[in-house]
């Protein structure tokens, strides 16, 4: 097994796998931005927890780690920026999966992929009905399929170039893993236990 690169959070100093942390870097104009792939230059890492974002901002850890001053930013603004960048990346990944014919959407189609054991990830829209969410979550659990709740029906549909969708199934392990890795970086109030991403809710 290939060892995952490890980095330290600038706020709590905990060492974690790089994929579990959010990389922050400077862009022209002295503003902070979030690296979801392709970001260049010096960067620092922070846990995707609100307490770490707040501590890093309060103590000036980004300016210290980046060795440069940056435009003032609140923890709330940084959290919103992280959410925005992650949602853009997830939208792009779902679009690529659609073009590769590795994704399907709609309740019947998604349920079919679970029953055929071809689904690798199920996404339920954050504004889908409670009944729909509970049913898909149960089916995914029974089939050993990763399940997450992310984005709204409008956003899921837009990502796939179709009408609003309450659920999506990703049928490729690479795309599924990339989407999961991105959504796990969404800021949360408290730490989650290992494997909790299966039940993670991420609103777009």
Image (cartoon, rainbow, N blue to C red):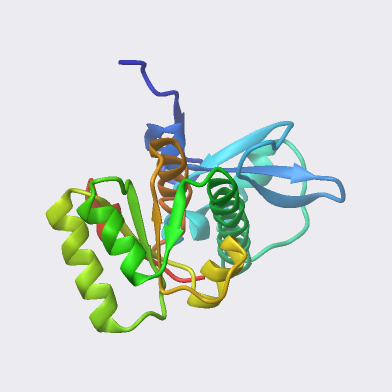
Residue 198 spot, x, y in % from top left = 26, 55
- How far across and down, in percent of the image, does residue 13 sit? 42, 38
Q: Is residue 32 left or right of residue 182?
A: right
Residue that appears at 28% across and 77% down? 132
In the picture, the quarter occupied by the N terminus is: top left
Question: Along the line of sight, which residue is nearer the eye, 71 or 157?
Answer: 157
Q: Residue at x 63, y 61 (%)?
A: 81
Along the viewing direction, whichever of 27 and 122 lies nearer the viewer: 122
The single residue placed furthest to the left in the displayed view is: 142
Q: Is residue 184 left or right of residue 44?
A: left
Q: Is residue 41 left or right of residue 15?
A: right
Answer above or below: position of 172 versus 202: above
Q: Is residue 152 above or below residue 14?
A: below
Closer to the camera in the image, 190 or 166: 166
Can residue 60 be seen here? The reply is yes
Is any atom of residue 192 visible in this view?
no
- 112 above or below 154? above
Residue 152 in the image, given as x and y percentages of width and height:
49, 75
Q: What is the total number of numbered labels drawn onto the structure image?
A: 0
- Give the percent coordinates (x, y) of residue 123: 38, 61
């Amino acid at each position: 097994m290939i060892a995952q690169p490890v980095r330290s959070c600038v706020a709590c100093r905990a060492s974690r796998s790089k994929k579990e942390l959010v990389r922050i870097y400077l862009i022209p104009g002295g503003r902070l931005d979030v690296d979801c792939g392709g970001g260049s230059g010096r960067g620092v890492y922070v846990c995707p927890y609100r307490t770490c974002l707040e501590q890093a901002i309060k103590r000036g850890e980004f300016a210290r780690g980046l060795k440069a001053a940056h435009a003032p930013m609140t923890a709330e603004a940084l959290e919103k920026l992280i959410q925005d960048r992650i949602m853009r990346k997830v939208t792009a990944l779902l679009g690529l999966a659609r073009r590769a014919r590795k994704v399907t959407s709609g309740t019947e189609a998604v349920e079919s992929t679970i029953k055929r054991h071809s689904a690798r990830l199920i996404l339920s829209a954050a504004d889908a009905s409670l009944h729909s969410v509970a049913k898909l979550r149960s089916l995914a659990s029974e089939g050993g399929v990763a399940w997450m709740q992310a984005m709204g029906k409008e956003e899921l549909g837009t990502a796939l170039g179709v009408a609003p969708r309450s659920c999506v199934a990703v049928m490729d392990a690479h795309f599924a893993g990339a989407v999961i890795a991105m959504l796990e970086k969404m800021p949360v109030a408290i730490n989650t236990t290992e494997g909790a991403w299966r039940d993670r809710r991420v609103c777009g």
